Image (cartoon, helix red, strand yellow):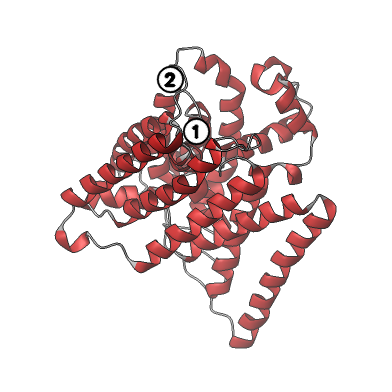
Amino acid sequence: MTDISASFETPSKGSRLFIRAALIGVALIAILTLIAAAGVRYGLLLAIGIGFGLTLEGLRFGFAGPWRAMILRREPAGLLAQLIAIALVAIVAFPLLSGDHSELIGAHAAIGWAMVGGAFVFGAAMQLVLGCGSGTLVNAGSGNPVSVVALPFFIIGAFAGSYHLLWWTELGQLPLVALQGTSGLGITLLGLLIVGGVALAIAPKQARKVPRRLLVAALLLAALAVANFVVAGQPWGVVYGLGLWGAKVTSALGADLSASPYWASAAHQERLAASLLTDYTSLTNLGIILGAFIVAVWRSGLSAKLPSLSAKAWIAAIVAGFLLGYSSRLALGCNVGAFFSGISTGSLHGWAWFVAAFAGSWVGIRLRKPLGLEG
C-alpha cells in the first residue's frame, strides 16, 4: 500500500526463511500473550488488526490511492473494490443491528458543519501524504518515510481535535439519521450501486475491469470488518485509538484534561485509566501496523531510503499529518470509521462524509506539486 517508492536490500534465501519464521512467531506470541494477559476478545482483535494490515499491504488495497486514480485518470477499480467491500459488510451488519443484539452498535453520527468541513480537509490532507487513517498506519508499518513522519502528528492532531470536538459540534448539526432494516439495506445497496455505476460510466472502457487482487482484498476486508463488528460489538474504526494514544501521552506528562468536556466525560476517563491493550480500536491499529510490517519484511526487508523532498515538502507532510488527525475527529471518522463503517451500518453521515472528502481530495491532489511533494 506504500505510495512512495522504496529501495530494499534483498537478504539471502536462508536469512529470508529465518526472518519469515520469526515474523510468524512474533505475531503468534503477541496474540497468545494478549489472550493470556487480557482475555480472548482482545487477542482476537489484535489478530483481526494484523489481518487488516496483511490484507491492505499485501494486496495493495487502499483508499487515498484509488480516489486519486479516479480523479486524475478516471480509473474506478480501487473505488469499486471499496464499494463492494462496504456492500458485503452491510449485507451482514444491517440484519445484526436489526436483531436482538443490544451489545452491537453502528458507526452512527450526525451531519453537521464541523463534520462536513472536517471531511473536506481530511480528503485534502490524505492526498498530501498519500494515505488516509488506515493508509498512514499501513505505510508507517511498511517503512514509508513520509508516513513515519506524519503518523506522530496524526496522533497529536487526533487528540487536539477530540479535545475541541464538542465546541465544534455546537456550531450546528442535523438530527442523527440511520437507515435500518431491509428497506435501509436496500437504500444503502442502491446508493452503492449508483456510485459504482457513475464511476464505470465515466471511466475509459479499458479501465472498467476490477483486478482479481482487489476483489480478493475486498472480500477479505469485508470478512475482517464483520469479525471486528461481532467481536468488538462496534464497527471497524481508526481515529479514536490514535486520539486516545495522544491523550494518554499528554496525561502521562502531567496535563489536566478536565478542561475538555470530551475527555472529562466518565466514559473517556475510564478509557484513559485502562490499558491500551484493552481498547478495541487501539488493538486493531497496532495490528494494522504489525501486519504491514510483516508483509514489508516478508517481501524483501525494511530499508526504505528517504525520498529526495525539499524542506517545504517535509513541513507540508507534518502539517498534513496534524490536519489528518484534527479534521478526522471533527469529521467523526476517517475513510474507515465514517465512510466504510458509517455507510455499511446505515449512517447517513457516511454518505455526506464521502462527498465532502472526495471534493477535498480533488483539492489536495492539486496542492501536491506547489508544496513540493511531487515533480
Circle 2 is placed at which residue position? 112
Q: Dot 2, crowdedness within 10 Å: few (<14), some or many (≥20)?
A: many
Q: Is residue 285 visible?
A: no
Q: Residue at x 60, y 42 (%)?
A: 152
Q: Is residue 4 left or right of residue 73?
A: right
- The percent coordinates of residue 101 (x first, y second) are 62, 38
In this view, the residue farthest toward the right is: 37
Residue shown at 47% from the left, 29% from the top: 331
The residue sitting at 66% across, 16% down in the picture is 261
Dividing the picture into quadrants, the one containing residue 31 is: bottom right
At label 2, the amino acid type is Gly
* Residue type for callout 1: Ser
Q: Nearer the viewer, residue 366 or 97?
A: 97
In the rendered structure, the answer to whether residue 7 lies left or right of residue 22 reads left
Label 1: state its secondary structure: helix
Q: Is residue 191 left or right of residue 97?
A: left
- Relative to 51, say whether 91 is above or below: above
Q: Position of residue 103 (x, y in %)?
A: 66, 36
Q: Secondary structure at mark 2?
A: loop
Where residue 324 sits in the image (x, y, percent)? 48, 36
Quadrant of res 52: bottom right
Q: Where is residue 71 drawn, in percent x and y?
A: 25, 46
Badge 1 density bin: few <14, some 14–19, many ≥20, Cα 10 Å: many
- Mark 1 — residue? 328
The mark that comes first in sequence, 2 or 1, is 2
Q: CA distance from mark 2 to mark 1?
A: 13 Å
